[in-house]
Image (tube, helix red, strand yellow):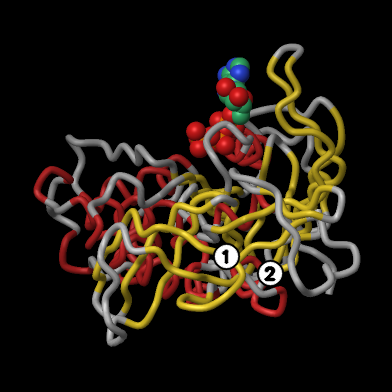
Amino acid sequence: MSDFLVLDNLSLSYGRTTVVDQLNLGVRKGELIALLGPSGCGKTTTMRAVAGLLTPSAGKIVLDGKDVTRVPPNKRQVGLMFQSYALFPHLSVFENVAFGLRLKGMRGDALSSKVNEGLASVGLAQYGDRRPADLSGGQQQRVALARSLVMDPKILLLDEPLSNLDARLRLEMRTELQRVQKESGLTMIFVTHDQSEALSLADRIVVMRDGEIEQLGTPEDIYNRPVSAFVADFVGFENIFAIEGGELKGKGEAFTLASPLPEGATGLAWRPEAVWLGEGAFEGTVIGAAFVGQMREYVLESAIGRIKVNVDANLPAHPLDTRLAFDLRVEDAVVLRR
Ligand SMILES: Nc1ncnc2c1ncn2[C@@H]1O[C@H](COP(=O)(O)OP(=O)(O)OP(=O)(O)O)[C@@H](O)[C@H]1O
């Protein structure tokens, strides 16, 4: 299947500063893609280019088989929902959702049924007469979503759509977004710097770093098989070591493992639960210990650096300052190859 949205060698600049450099990305129809990366890596800039708010300095954007690189924003059928989803405070919920449709010349029954359908799709069928101020933050967010959906965009871009919501609402809206997307079959790209949001929502994740794609894959790929220390760090690996001259090096002394290093590896990383505690070639002092329900989390200070270890909470606890042996085994590591 050919891609529905293609970013082909896309370069984006502000003045003389190139922010995104020769980016290539294909998005399939009906896919939910997350753009994940730290602040300043170019996520919003990429979205702005897809929406037509920024003209690329090189490369092209193809949407639904049509080159839209030079097409103005209002002719692209690209929906946008930003973090500040500013609803019109003086208009009712119904009128907020109707706004764009009226601009397109829609009136009467066609307008009412379209708006009501939009409100129903986000679970707000009964709220048309309210003002935005009389809704919860989550409900306001859903009005903004309905406002985007009724325009029948080919693709909907969401820039940090959930970051204004508190933790509980954010979880609720995640589920809501996923439901709406699956029911409507709409292609969506959402920007986030929250790895758990990306992992839980997306069909595929694009991890960006300094305007380039560091890794593209399913949530399982990204979580279980990060290609680089950068991605590993982003998805919660705590114990990351680079390979330099056949030795492993983190924040402490370099060391050599008993087993041979995997072919082509540039680094090895261990999740806290993949570190052996109580036996092994290394020794560390417990400088942090926390009970977190099913697990106990330890921080060990050792010659090779600080090591984070999670073990079953049913095992006997180790108090602070205890000296403990631990082991890092190649077979329990994730191999980084970039
Ligand atoms: N209008 C602008 N003029 C000049 N530089 C800009 C402009 N907007 C963004 N930048 C720069 O471009 C780079 C990428 O910014 P962008 O907003 O795309 O990052 P981001 O990944 O979306 O970050 P965040 O998560 O903080 O929103 C940053 O270094 C930023 O300072």
Determine the residue located farthest toward the left in the rendered image. Answer: 134
As drawn, the label of residue 102 is none
Q: Out of 111 and 338, give the one closest to the viewer.
A: 338
Answer with mark 1 or mark 2, whichever residue precedes in sequence.
1
Q: Is the shortest distance between ligand 1 and the CB of mark 2 under 8 Å?
A: no
State how far apart marks 1 and 2 are (Cα). 19 Å
Q: Are marks 1 and 2 in contact (CB under 8 Å)?
A: no
Q: Position of residue 254 (x, y in %)?
A: 70, 49
| Crowding at mark 2 (Cα within 10 Å: few <14, some 14-19, many 20+) | many
Q: Out of 62 and 36, give the one closest to the viewer.
A: 36
* Left or right: 109 in relation to 77: left
Quadrant assignment for the N terminus: bottom right
Query: Which residue does the image show at 25% across and 57% down from the upper left?
Result: 167
Kind of residue indicated by mark 2: Val
Q: Is the shortest distance between ligand 1 and the CB of mark 1 under 8 Å?
A: no
* Left or right: 92 in relation to 262: left
| Crowding at mark 1 (Cα within 10 Å: few <14, some 14-19, many 20+) | some
Kind of residue indicated by mark 1: Phe
Q: Which residue is mark 1?
A: 282
Q: Which residue is mark 2?
A: 334
Q: Locate residue 298: give its quadrant.
A: bottom left
Q: Is residue 201 above or below residue 44?
A: below
Element type at mark 2: strand
Query: Which residue does the image show at 16% across and 61% down from the upper left?
Result: 127
Q: Position of residue 124 (x, y in %)?
A: 23, 66
